[in-house]
Image: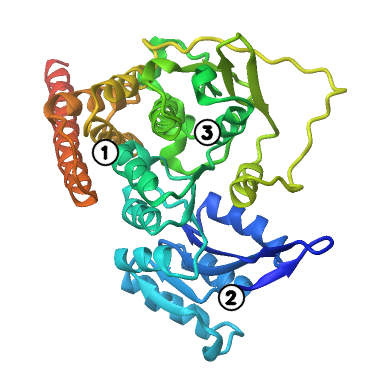
Amino acid sequence: MQVTFPLVGDIIRPLKTLTILGSTGSIGVSTLDVVGRHPEQYRVHALVAGHNIDLLAQQILRFRPKVAATATDADRESLIVRLKDSALAPQDWPELRWGPEARVEVATERDVDFVMSAIVGVAGLEATYEAITHGKRVGLANKEVLVASGKLVIDAARKSGTELIPVDSEHNGAHQCLRAGKRSEVARLILTASGGPFRETPLEKLARVTPAEALKHPTWKMGQRITIDSATLMNKGFEVIEACWLFDFSADEVDVVIHPQSTVHAMVEYCDGSVIAQISATDMRMPIQYALTYPARESAPVPRLDWTEARSWSFSAPDFEKFPALRLAYQAMRQGGSATCTLNAADEIAVEAFLAGQIAFPAIPAVVEETLERVPAREAASVAEVLEIDELSRSVARQIVHERSQKTYEERGQVSVRA
């Protein structure tokens, strides 16, 4: 039975039932903030988390989902302990599940209308893909879904007739700008990038930057990997790939400009020379709410821009020599096939190695480039094949990191002997 709630006059809208993949991450937390402000509009069917069990327990107490899923059985056992210590009676607990199969189940169950895909990495791919094949509307906040398997996902969306509403601020902005005209009237899409913490750092000094310095993003507070990817501009490269799949652009039709103020999120240039820009405060609750309410708009709990204040916005071209990761993303998209899957997998391994002190900052794109050279691209026919390519690419990237680390160790040893 469909539950409804009344609006003004005689208008009746259905209560929207949600599954949130990645409920304890930044996007999941912001989604629940929006949902919590409108209990008459949204009902949480399932919360899917990783290892942050304390936060998941708090979310269960507030939103009372029917199902809660964790990454592992050990996490599920920890959640049971937390719930036993809470004031929630056992009969009011959600059904507790765990693992990849649980993610797929809660993303495809009949009562679910909307799936927020916010699990970081390829861990969220299978559940998101299955939600799409089942015709669920998906709020897409997971870059890896389209970077690793864009053709599979978009083909599935076209077949099921469902909609993917981007939640990333840039793609959400592009989605809004594209409502101003027909796709055939568009000349190009322009994505903005803050430039990261090393926008003004000379190229020769990048080899000495530390993980702590790279994690100081000037605009956004994000997870470690995405923050490092923003510092290398790989994150913007991923966004180029995403945009190509979401909006049916070629790589040559998507440009990137550096915009340190991070207020203009995306621009669309139409064939007559008109440029439509999406501008808003840097608050993820706005694009999240847009995804939840599309095609309608509702008041969002975000700061408004004060146009009476003096302000200055600047735009400049990215430096592809200083930030080769962006060039590699364009290259992989043009190559096609599984190249973008390898790009993503190798980058994740390289970022982990940098954070662990195994390689220097400039070695991140170097590891990615060498991995792309060693792993041949091919067309993946299934999610299982995508995951197989992903694992192969990670294995190759780990070997390259090891080779580089060993070479550095040997060079240091030679210097020590000479001394």
Which is nearer the eye, 4 or 316? 4
- How would you rate the neighbour count of disc 1 (Cα within 10 Å): few for under 14, some for 14-19, many for 20 or more? many
Of discs 1 and 3, which sits in the foreground? 3
Disc 2 to disc 1: CB gap under 8 Å: no
Q: How many marks?
A: 3
- How would you rate the neighbour count of disc 2 (Cα within 10 Å): few for under 14, some for 14-19, many for 20 or more? some
Q: Quadrant of the N terminus?
A: bottom right
Which numbered circle lies on residue 345? 1
Q: Which residue is mark 2?
A: 64
Query: Residue 417, relative to residue 167: is it above or below?
Result: above
Q: Position of residue 397 (x, y in %)?
A: 19, 35
The quarter holding residue 63 reads: bottom right
Task: Find numbered disc 2 in the image and state the secondary structure of the residue it sits on.
Answer: loop
Q: Which residue is mark 3?
A: 171
Q: What amino acid does circle 2 point to?
A: Arg
User: How far separated are the C-alphas under marks 3 and 2?
Assistant: 31 Å
Q: What amino acid does circle 3 point to?
A: His
Query: Residue 328, relative to residue 11: is it above or below?
Result: above
- How would you rate the neighbour count of disc 3 (Cα within 10 Å): few for under 14, some for 14-19, many for 20 or more? many
User: How far separated are the C-alphas under marks 1 and 3?
Assistant: 22 Å
Q: Position of residue 3 (x, y in %)?
A: 63, 73
Of discs 2 and 1, which sits in the foreground? 2
Looking at this view, name the residue that lies furthest to the front.
10
